[in-house]
Amino acid sequence: MPLEEVQRLVDLVRESGVGEIRVRRGETEITVKALPDAPAPPIAQPITEIAVQPAEGLASPERDGLHAVRSPVVGTFYRAPAPGEDPYVEVGDRVRAGQTVCIVEAMKLMNEIVTDVSGEVVEILAENAGGVEYDQPLLYLRPDAGQ
Amino acid sequence: MPLEEVQRLVDLVRESGVGEIRVRRGETEITVKALPDAPAPPIAQPITEIAVQPAEGLASPERDGLHAVRSPVVGTFYRAPAPGEDPYVEVGDRVRAGQTVCIVEAMKLMNEIVTDVSGEVVEILAENAGGVEYDQPLLYLRPDAGQ
Amino acid sequence: MLGKVLVANRGEIALRVIRACRELGIRSVAVYSTADADSLHHELADESVCIGPPPAASSYLNVPAIISAAELTGADAIHPGYGFLAENSRFAEICERVGLKFVGPDSRTIALMGDKVAARAAASRAGVPVTPGSDGLCRDVAEVKRVGAEVGYPLVIKASAGGGGKGMRVVESEAEVADAYMSASREAGANFGDGSVYVERFLERLRHVEVQVLADSSGTTVTFPERDCSVQRRYQKLIEESPAPGLPQEIRDSLMAASEDLIASLDYEGAGTVEFVYSGSEFYFIEMNTRLQVEHPVTEMITGVDIVAEQLKVASGERLEVSDEARTPNGHAMEFRINSEDPRRNFLPQAGLIEVYNPPGGPGVRVDSHLYAGYTVPPHYDSLLAKLIVHARERGATISRGLRALDEFAISGLETTLPLHLAVLEDEEFRRGGVSTGFLAERELRDEGGLLRLVAGGSPSA
Amino acid sequence: MLGKVLVANRGEIALRVIRACRELGIRSVAVYSTADADSLHHELADESVCIGPPPAASSYLNVPAIISAAELTGADAIHPGYGFLAENSRFAEICERVGLKFVGPDSRTIALMGDKVAARAAASRAGVPVTPGSDGLCRDVAEVKRVGAEVGYPLVIKASAGGGGKGMRVVESEAEVADAYMSASREAGANFGDGSVYVERFLERLRHVEVQVLADSSGTTVTFPERDCSVQRRYQKLIEESPAPGLPQEIRDSLMAASEDLIASLDYEGAGTVEFVYSGSEFYFIEMNTRLQVEHPVTEMITGVDIVAEQLKVASGERLEVSDEARTPNGHAMEFRINSEDPRRNFLPQAGLIEVYNPPGGPGVRVDSHLYAGYTVPPHYDSLLAKLIVHARERGATISRGLRALDEFAISGLETTLPLHLAVLEDEEFRRGGVSTGFLAERELRDEGGLLRLVAGGSPSA
């Protein structure tokens, strides 16, 4: 089948809103389909024991107007530089871009987590001394206006 | 099949609200489907040998304004009461409701197929002495106005 | 070898036969009702013919349409699958008359085994133990009482033409005989057009065991290790396994020998199943199914024999060639019937669109199913959606594999028996093995945080 | 038994390990990149941890992230699957140091076998035949020429750190040595950070055969019947089968004995594969893979042994208990790698949405795959979508079953190697059995009415 005809079939599908066109001529079969909305991923049957790890947070979406500081590594989240010391930040604190807001320890290495926006700390999401995944939101900032 | 005919099938699907149109004519098969809410059925991989039974027609929908006389049984289609005799009907003939228009033989029984509408024969779809499936359209009538 | 086989069935079993045909180089013809126009058996067969409207009586039970389809397509044999026309001796006879090979035994054998009283007599003649009871039909209440006095109560009254628990009544004492006789006979008449009944001693805490057999036209017979099908709900099997847990080898040998004696006495041909009840260390013949059974894959998994391929070879006139190793179970297999029934709502049948379908994979897992995502389960036919069969080296590992595979099996759009199977596999008594047919009736299903669990104390009617 | 195992992999092999864990009652931890947030291994594991962004170097090869995930979740072992970190001795060493059991041999054995020259020497010491060639590394062109004069041309120059055909050059005569040496060494340096090479006689029309081995920590070893993996494209295996067609029993015995000698000499632990070339009636050691292989299911199908479960048991310190029957092939099995590559466009890799996914079912069919309808294949990782494994009583029936199952396998949304496998199974020479590794290169793929066919006369570069 000449390509011009196939092109016309494609146009037909697009313009008509019809889902699928199939043409078979002798040994040749041509199918033209409009893209369907993707089906949902399969929902596995409930697992007999589901262990919900309290610290195993899942990535939360950005909240309206808020900025999430996310973990760049898998590790353990700490709010303070060392046990007994004051936390880097508390809810309500103002922070500047470049300021350390917490630590994620991985392989005995303390990774200082630095915010790249200035603003006010509105929520601390991870639990102190709990595990965090890659890309997990650690805290929410309300960015300063005009950034 | 010319593309104009495909265009007409597409229009038909859109206008008729019918879910699917499939036409197989000899080696040519054309399918037109309205967009389903559900994902399309799986398309099996091409089978090594595809035997297209020329007589193995698939159910076609009503065409705009036309009435299909369908086979009520699986069997063999005959246009005439016996070999050598005249066909019951020819294209262009006018038929009355209750009139026999063809025969489908099944298990050595001759089933006279009777039309339940009056009108003009516009197309004979099945092949004489060929096999027909249940519900397969045998011929198209244009019903008389006012029916 | 046969050249072209028409498969007079639908659903997973039609697919099973079509697959066997393709592997043997036999062309396959599917027949389908208008309700099955999107079905996989219609898609995957080499040819297909629409035979009628949705009601089974007008399509899958429509003998003239099926014979016509076979003639139109030039098929030389018909495989009936199970259900529908598979044990209809009249259909087998019509096939014989019009020169179509019916894949199964001859019509007289089907008729003989279809008559429960005659089958019992045939088993007796072949030296196969039958449950103590009436010699033949019981024509009146007095005759039932006479049998009762002889073999003792409780008794069970059964329909001669019966099956599936229809026309069956348990009688605890002589006082109940009259009422039970009348109602069993009435129900049998209504369901099978034949009100005749017979009587057997009622065995309690019995297990359902059965022996798969194969025979060719030259008299070679093979019997396989038994299947245990005791997990049933209202006489419908739900889980089948092989070998039967804890069954002594000498009982296995006796079951297989008895089955072999029976089919030899019948000049049997093709596949069949001899069904027994097993109680204490005794077993008794119940009936013989002269066809392929739903649970045949359990035997295939532990023996490596392709039973459907053997059926087709035998129907082609070939000799059976099954090695002696197939008589010894290799590991342990279990089948779970995934039905479109809602176990939370008294097994209400479900029909409708399958949104997600993702069967489990990996080692020791087999799935026989006609489902696919986007398929609509029609409301007209039986509720079997899929068979999940698992195989491992021993029963404990088979149960673990079953739990894993059931857990992975993703079907959405309608409710299924998947959670029921998970509940059974978690049950202590089931895990020990050897449960009786009362297993499910003695338990209640309870929903615990979205998961089903079986708890003791169900009513016998459950 | 281990309590919790972290699976440091993705795709079908992560699922395979998670399934084995579940069946053994071991808790599983999946790790996944942000590109795999919708993946089945993440869905089906008991716990899971996101370890990094899409590039493998930042996620599946990110050792600190994986070790941290194991520590956070309290895993006591790591199963590396195949690929990624599976043969990284440094990773195994880190696991050992931090007290995580690495499911595989110790880091020194991995390092030893990862160095092709050292592995060759180890095989030689164990009495396993190696291809005639240099005793160790060839440090200059003159040394290659000296070997050439000794063992004859053609020769093949190979990278010591190599694999997958990288840093490999065939040399037809002494005149070609200088150029080939330089380019092989340069390519090896660029790909493996190590330009050292060694030299072997180049064997023509050879077959790739390999022996699966298992060993426990107390010195019990098991070897299995060989697999034949000669159907390759550019050194990538496409079809594997067991047993190797037409291989005499005495060669099988010798291959298994040689493999047993090698692993005994190494104090090996866990699963591994000893790879050989087989040409004429001679076989020579090529290399040993110190990990699970893609094609392990082929061996599982013909022996009934769950190799991944045995790996986990051995890693738990348990003894291997594999019956002697596993040393004899039971039937014949074949695996087809279904890759997201378009065989009509020079195997162009494909990524994107899987619209339809319906794997085949029925007897003798196993599918290992992480696909589901609606899954999006990410462009970041290897192209293996699914493994279809078929098993039957003999090779002819296995091929028929393979054709049937490949035909049924419905994947839409992207192109796959499904039609290539159908073409191979229709090829006369393949059907006879025993093709050499040049099989695909000697053929061209031709599209005939939508179906692919192999025709003789491909170029050696195909």
Image (tube, coloured by chain):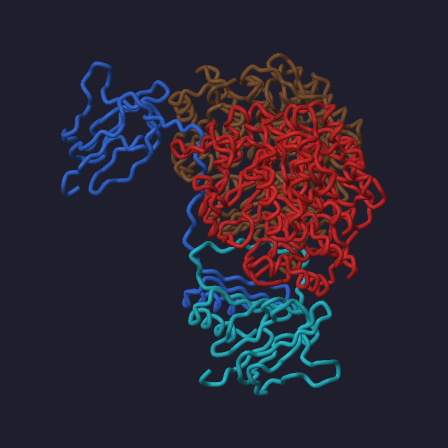
Chain colours: A blue, B cyan, C red, D brown
- Looking at the rendered image, the quarter that the C terminus of chain A falls into is top left
Question: Residue D94 location in percent, x, y?
Answer: 46, 18
Using the rendered image of the protein, determine whether residue C204 is visible from the camera's viewpoint. yes
Q: Is residue D286 visible?
A: no
In the displayed structure image, the side of residue D202 where residue D381 appears, left or right: left
- How many marks on residues? 0
Q: Which residue occupies 55% across, 22% down?
A: D312
Query: Quick one: C77 or D449, which is closer to the camera?
Result: C77
Give the residue furthest to the bottom.
Answer: B93
Q: Residue at x 63, y 36 (%)?
A: C156
Specify the quadrant of the image occupied by residue D250.
Answer: top right
- Residues C171 and A90: in front is C171
Foreground pick, B63 / C456: C456
Rendered image quadrant of residue D303: top right
- The location of residue D354, given as percent across then percent down, is 48, 48
In the rendered image, residue A75, in percent from the top left (x then y), is placed at 34, 24
Query: In the picture shown, does residue C187 fall above or below D154?
Result: below
Q: Is residue A24 above or below residue D276?
A: below
C409 or C265: which is nearer to us?
A: C265
Q: Is residue C356 left or right of residue A93?
A: right
State the image coordinates of residue D91 (x, y, percent, origin top left). Answer: 48, 22
| Quadrant housing the N terminus of chain A | bottom right
Going by the picture, which residue comes out furthest to the top?
D218
Residue pushed farthest right? C218
Q: Is residue D317 left or right of residue A104?
A: right
